[in-house]
Amino acid sequence: MVILMKRTATEKDVAAVAEFLKNKGLGTHISKGQDATIIGVIGDKSCLAQTPLEMLPGVEKAVPIMQSYKLASRAFAPEGRVCHVGEEEIGGKKLALIGGPCAVESEEQIFEAARGVAAAGARFLRGGAYKPRTSPYSFQGLEEKGLPLLRQAADAYGLKVVSEIISENLIESEGQYVDMFQVGARNMQNFRLLRELGRCKIPVLLKRGIASTIDEWLDAAEYIMAGGNYNVVLCERGIRTFETATRNTLDICAVPVVKERSNLPIIVDPSHAAGKAAYIRSLSLAGIAAGADGIIVEVHPDPMNAKSDAAQQIKPDAFCALAEDIRRIAPVLGREA
Ligand code: PEP
Ligand code: MN
């Protein structure tokens, strides 16, 4: 952390700040510039996390130079982490392809989707049983009835199951059916949920909040990791901006930024970013080209009649063609698919 003093700060102000820090057990490195003095703080700054240093006389601002997350930081594991989902991996050389409907709607629908996803060569089936919908009047998912259907469909085609977890009270029951929990955008800062997921052994796909900065997202990942669960994958799913042409704005920049700041794998969700089936292919390829470790795409056998997110779901044959395109560009990026 560095503390920038005001131009008008006196020697006494600087000495008082140094004394304040000394009393907290911290050292200082004072550098007097022509215009202002900068105080470098030496030692464990965690005791200053809640201290409004700007309230001390003469202080212009305090700038943290270290991020608050540690386990999730690139510095902590410079080689990067691989998330293990059974015998499957996310974050290794092989790109992860996850496909499946927004919501599990019926046995027929989820089996049909699983068949298409497996035919595309993907290894993971997604499908929401519990759907956190913006309106209470929208379809809320089949809830506990959806989970066994999802499991059976995945098992029939040798796929891993990814499904959203909306409450810490469901971890145990839902954990019987899924291989990976998804934390949705709306729950990214549900800290109690994150903390409990940290205590369990099931891998977590952590989506970025609708209006969260990358550092807030990494802090959320840190909550899970701090509990001992390092099997975390980040998912960029579009953020809210002034643009209305798409449902959200896919923040492609987040991919290289996360790679630089964090050791966690990151995948891209073009479906919730675009909100429109026609854009899925471009955004998926852009995500992979930017360095993402995979994609999660909404795939529905009959998008026109989907009970949620109908406009953004693609048919299995389109997912198959997309997987083929990804396989073509993967070698250029030093990856496999
Ligand atoms: C979903 O994956 O269906 C979903 C609700 O996603 P998000 O949390 O990103 O909106
Ligand atoms: Mn959806």
Image: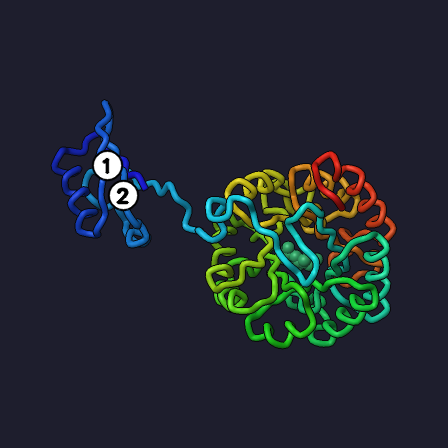
Query: Considering only vertical position in the picture, is 167 above or below 74?
Result: below
Look at label 2 and name its amino acid: Ile
Indicate if the residue with disc 1 has its beta carbon within 8 Å of ligand 1.
no
Query: Considering only vertical position in the picture, is 38 above or below 215?
Result: above
Instruction: Identify the mark nearer the N-term, 1 or 2.
Output: 1
- Which residue is the site of mark 1? 29
Residue 73 shown left or right of residue 120 in the figure:
left
Front position in the image: 104 or 158: 158
Please say whether residue 81 is visible from this viewpoint: yes
Residue reaching furthest top?
34
Please say whether residue 302 is visible from this viewpoint: no
Image coloring type:
rainbow
Q: Residues within 10 Å of mark 1 (few under 14, many from 20)?
A: few
Q: How crowded is mark 2: few (under 14 residues within 10 Å), some or many (20 or more)?
A: some
Please give the name of the residue rendered at 76% of the width and 42% of the height, measured from the top-left corner: 279
- Which residue is the site of mark 2? 42
Look at label 1 and name its amino acid: His
Mark 1 → mark 2, Cα distance in angstroms: 7 Å
Please give the name of the residue rendered at 73% of the width and 60% of the height, measured from the top-left corner: 126
Tags 1 and 2 touching, CB below 8 Å = yes
Quadrant of the displayed image that contains ligand 2: bottom right
The x, y position of residue 195, in whole percent, is 49, 65
Please give the name of the residue rendered at 63% of the width and 77% of the height, measured from the top-left corner: 173
The x, y position of residue 228, in whole percent, is 50, 63
**Element under disc 1:** strand
Q: Residue 75 carries which label?
A: none
The x, y position of residue 241, in whole percent, is 58, 43
